[in-house]
Image (cartoon, helix red, strand yellow):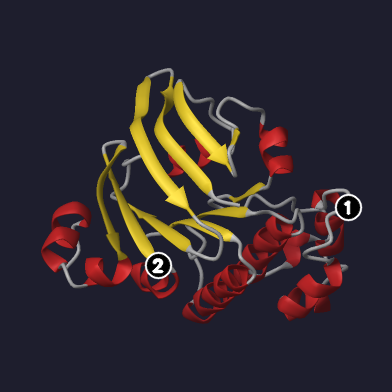
Amino acid sequence: MSLRVRDLRSGYRQGEVLHGVDLDARPGHALAVLGRNGAGKTTLLLTLMGLIRPTSGSVRLDGRELAGARTEQIARAGIALVPQGRRIWPTVTVREHLALARRRHASTWTTDRLFELFPNLAARHRNPAWQLSGGEQQMLAIARALVTAPSVVLLDEPSEGLAPAAVDQVAGIIRTMLDNQVAVVLVEHDLHLAFGVAESVAVLARGAIAHRAATADFRRDPATAHRLLGVA
């Protein structure tokens, strides 16, 4: 299923944060949403997931309008969020996380399949989440999203606080999602990770899309990257 976002606006009591965002995510492709701190990246993902209510605009998944829908309706429609900071339940075991998150009749990502994909989680399936390493907790957050059999996965800073080996594992999991025709929207400050998995880039600046490009073209344009992101 394709995600099509048009003229999306949302914010908080202090004021509007997103000012008419347009973006598209296609099955089997990853879009990296980049931007400086405060650009509105997390607000964008929370709005897509229904955790912040949009003030206007359209969010369509395979033609179905989801703007303004409740979070549980959006999840049932096929969108899953891996939030910044993981937000796992510390006293709940790995296996219980997956059982609680699983959608009824969802069979695309079975527990057995996820344990093959995440062998460390399989080895610690009886452990409460607080006993896992940071990398294992991130894998659990991703597995919890996949067990809902999503068409679109929203990833918010999945490399945050992880060692390089764990970041490489996250990249491998994202590629597996893409191989299985999941659409991925990736908010990420680690450009090595973002460029390694995303086919295209959208840069947010002050709540609006300031630049779009194929990833390869963006990498060949360091002047634009420096102007928009402050990197060389």
Residue 130, compared with residue 217, is above or below; it is above
Residue 79, compared with residue 134, is above or below; it is above
- Look at the numbered disc 1 and give the secondary structure of its residue: loop
For residue 219, side relative to residue 142 (left or right): left
Q: Residue at x 61, y 61 (%)?
A: 182
The residue that label 2 is drawn on is 199
Where is residue 10? Give x, y as percent: 43, 26
For residue 114, side relative to residue 57 (left or right): right
Where is residue 140? Give x, y as percent: 70, 63
Q: Residues within 10 Å of mark 1 (few under 14, many from 20)?
A: few
Residue 152, compared with residue 43, is above or below; it is below
Where is residue 67? Give x, y as percent: 55, 29
Q: Residues within 10 Å of mark 2 (few under 14, many from 20)?
A: some
Mark 2 or mark 1: whose residue is earlier in sequence: 1
- Look at the numbered disc 2 and give the secondary structure of its residue: loop
144 or 19: nearer the viewer: 19
Residue lying at the far left in this picture: please name it. 223
126 or 33: nearer the viewer: 33
For residue 121, side relative to residue 60 (left or right): right
The residue that label 1 is drawn on is 105
Residue type at mark 2? Answer: Glu
What's the mark number on residue 68?
Answer: none
Q: Residue at x 45, y 71 (%)?
A: 197
Residue type at mark 1? Answer: His
Q: Residue at x 85, y 50 (%)?
A: 100
Residue lying at the far front in this picture: please name it. 63
